[in-house]
Image (cartoon, grey):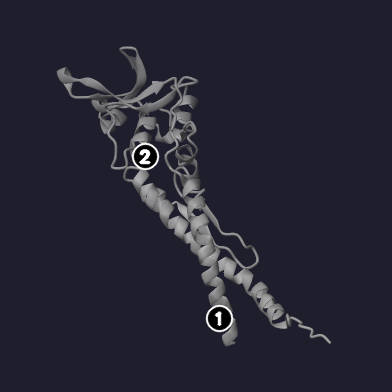
């Protein structure tokens, strides 16, 4: 005489099937919630790391949302810009701690034969910096025009009286070596009080940036802490919604 006990797995099989059915949707919801949390923290970090970042820089971290089919959410730094250099390029040195890339301004000077091979331009003591701690694009454009290094020949200043009068010859920019220092200088003052001030200094050592924007560490830390929690919440909501149908 015996008694047999059998486990009825039909309910478990049904529940497992329901979990499997809801997993792609729940995982995409969880991934997107975590991705936008990462984006928020990355943007906050930019505000802490960089002095008065521009709006483009502050909002440069973007999200490509996950779908049920892709199962991947992407957090990335904007790789294009309407004008100027893309954030992904100029922020790379701060993320990876690499050497600064050659600037378009430097390429223009080099192409014009004004910046020697192997040298780079860094801000001098006389440079006027904007609120973001940089020389303005307008100043760079003016310098290239006055030293005749603009990629657009029509933008280059000439030696005509009209051109000199327009820019104020006593306040013009020029490339030269003064007291052994090669760079871009600006004439200031008038008549007997004329002098020059260093706007950009040419240096042989390629400027380096230390790694100070922990882009990957921030993302990995948030994903590790919050994805399991977000997935549990998303699965609970998905299953609850399915039961009400």
Crowding around mark 1 (Cα neighbors within 10 Å: few <14, some 14 to 19, many 20+) is few
Between 92 and 130, the one nearer to me in the picture: 92
Q: Residue at x 66, y 78 (%)?
A: 15
Q: Which mark is residue 58?
A: none
Vertical arrangement, residue 73 with respect to residue 9, above or below: above
Q: Which residue lies most toward the front here?
A: 1
Q: Give percent across and percent down for residue 4.
A: 79, 84
- The part of the image, by quadrant, that contains residue 126 is top left
Q: Which residue is mark 2?
A: 137
Q: Earlier in the sequence, mark 1 or mark 2?
A: 2
Answer with the quarter of the image where residue 10 lies.
bottom right
> Residue beneath label 1, please?
240
Q: Examine the rendering and report whether any part of residue 77 can be seen.
A: no
Position in image of residue 85 (x %, y %): 46, 42
Identified at 49% across, 41% down, the residue is 89
Residue 27 appears in which quarter of the rendering? bottom right
Q: Is residue 20 above or below residue 97?
A: below
Q: Residue furthest top?
A: 179
Q: Mark 1 falls on what kind of element?
A: helix
């Amino acid at each position: 005489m015996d008694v047999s006990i059998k486990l009825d797995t039909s309910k478990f099989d049904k529940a497992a099937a329901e979990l499997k059915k809801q997993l792609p949707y729940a995982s995409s919801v969880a991934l997107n919630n975590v991705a936008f949390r990462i984006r928020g923290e990355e943007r906050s970090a930019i505000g802490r790391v960089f002095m008065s970042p521009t709006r483009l820089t502050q909002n440069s971290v973007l999200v490509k949302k996950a779908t049920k089919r892709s199962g991947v959410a992407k957090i990335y730094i904007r790789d294009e810009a309407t004008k100027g250099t893309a954030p992904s390029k100029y922020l790379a040195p701060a993320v990876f701690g690499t050497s600064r890339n050659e600037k378009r301004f430097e390429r223009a000077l080099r192409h014009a034969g004004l910046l020697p091979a192997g040298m780079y331009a860094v801000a001098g003591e006389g440079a006027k910096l904007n609120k973001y701690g940089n020389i303005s694009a307008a100043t760079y454009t003016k310098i290239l025009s006055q030293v005749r290094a603009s990629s657009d020949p029509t933008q280059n200043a000439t030696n005509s009286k009209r051109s000199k009068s327009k820019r104020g010859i006593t306040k013009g920019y020029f490339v030269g070596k003064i007291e052994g220092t090669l760079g871009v200088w600006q004439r200031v003052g008038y008549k007997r009080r004329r002098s020059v001030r260093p706007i950009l200094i040419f240096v042989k050592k390629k400027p380096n940036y230390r790694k100070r924007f922990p882009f990957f560490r921030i993302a990995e830390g948030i994903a590790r802490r919050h994805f399991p929690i977000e997935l549990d919440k998303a699965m609970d909501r998905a299953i609850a919604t399915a039961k009400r149908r």
